[in-house]
C-alpha cells in the first residue's frame, strides 16, 4: 500500500474474528476483499504475500452494513495462518475502497 497507507482499521472493520489479526493480515484481507468486490465475485482463494503466511477462501456475503461511522460490503474469510485456522467476518469500508481505486488510477512511473 505504498506511501498512502492508512491505519488498517480504516480499511476493514472486523465484525468477528476467531483469531488475532495482525496489521499485515488485515491489509491482505483488505486486498483480497477489494479484488473480489471489484470483480463482483462470490468467492476466491486467498494466499499470503509479503511475509504473511496465509491460505484459505474469501466469500463476498453480498450485503452492505454500517458499524458506527464505517459502512461497506461484507466478507467472510476462512483462513489458515501461522497462528492457526480461523474465521474473520468484516466489512470493507468505503474509505478502503476509495483508497484502492485512487491507487489503481495513478499512472505508473
Image (spheres, rainbow, N blue to C red):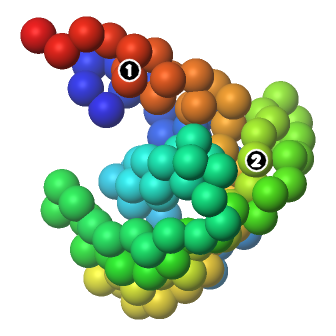
Judging from the image, what secondary structure is the residue with disc 1 in? helix
Q: Quadrant of the C terminus?
A: top left
Q: Position of residue 12 (x, y in %)?
A: 61, 45
Judging from the image, what secondary structure is the residue with disc 2 in? strand
- In the displayed image of the protein, which residue is found farthest to the left? 109
In terms of depth relative to the viewer, which is nearer, 74 or 25? 74
The residue identified by callout 2 is 73
On screen, residue 74 above or below 102: below
State the separation of the CA atoms marked 2 and 1. Answer: 20 Å
- Measuring 59% from the left and 70% from the top, which residue is drawn there? 43
On screen, residue 36 above or below 18: above
Q: Residues within 10 Å of mark 1 (few under 14, many from 20)?
A: few
- Measuring 50% from the left and 70% from the top, which residue is drawn there? 44
- Measuring 86% from the left and 47% from the top, which residue is drawn there? 64
* Residue 83 visible to the viewer: yes
Q: Quadrant of the N terminus?
A: top left
Of pointers 2 and 1, the one earlier in the residue sequence: 2
Q: Position of residue 60 (x, y in %)?
A: 68, 62
Q: Position of residue 47 (x, y in %)?
A: 32, 71
Q: Position of residue 23 (x, y in %)?
A: 40, 51
**What count of labels does the image hold?**
2
Left or right? Give the position of 29 relative to 88.
Answer: left
- Measuring 32% from the left and 12% from the top, which residue is drawn there? 106
**In which image quadrant can residue 15 be found?**
bottom right
The residue identified by callout 1 is 103
- In the displayed image of the protein, which residue is found farthest to the bottom? 84
In terms of depth relative to the viewer, which is nearer, 6 or 36? 36
Amino acid at each position: 500500500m505504498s506511501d498512502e497507507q492508512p491505519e488498517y482499521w480504516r480499511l476493514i472493520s472486523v465484525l468477528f474474528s476467531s483469531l488475532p489479526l495482525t496489521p499485515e493480515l488485515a491489509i491482505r484481507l483488505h486486498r483480497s476483499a477489494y479484488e473480489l468486490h471489484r470483480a463482483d465475485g462470490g468467492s476466491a482463494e486467498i494466499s499470503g504475500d509479503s511475509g504473511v503466511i496465509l491460505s484459505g477462501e474469501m466469500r463476498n456475503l453480498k450485503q452492505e452494513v454500517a458499524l458506527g461511522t464505517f459502512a461497506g460490503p461484507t466478507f467472510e474469510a476462512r483462513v489458515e495462518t501461522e497462528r492457526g485456522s480461523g474465521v474473520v467476518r468484516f466489512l470493507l469500508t468505503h474509505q478502503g475502497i476509495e483508497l484502492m481505486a485512487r491507487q489503481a488510477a495513478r499512472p505508473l512511473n
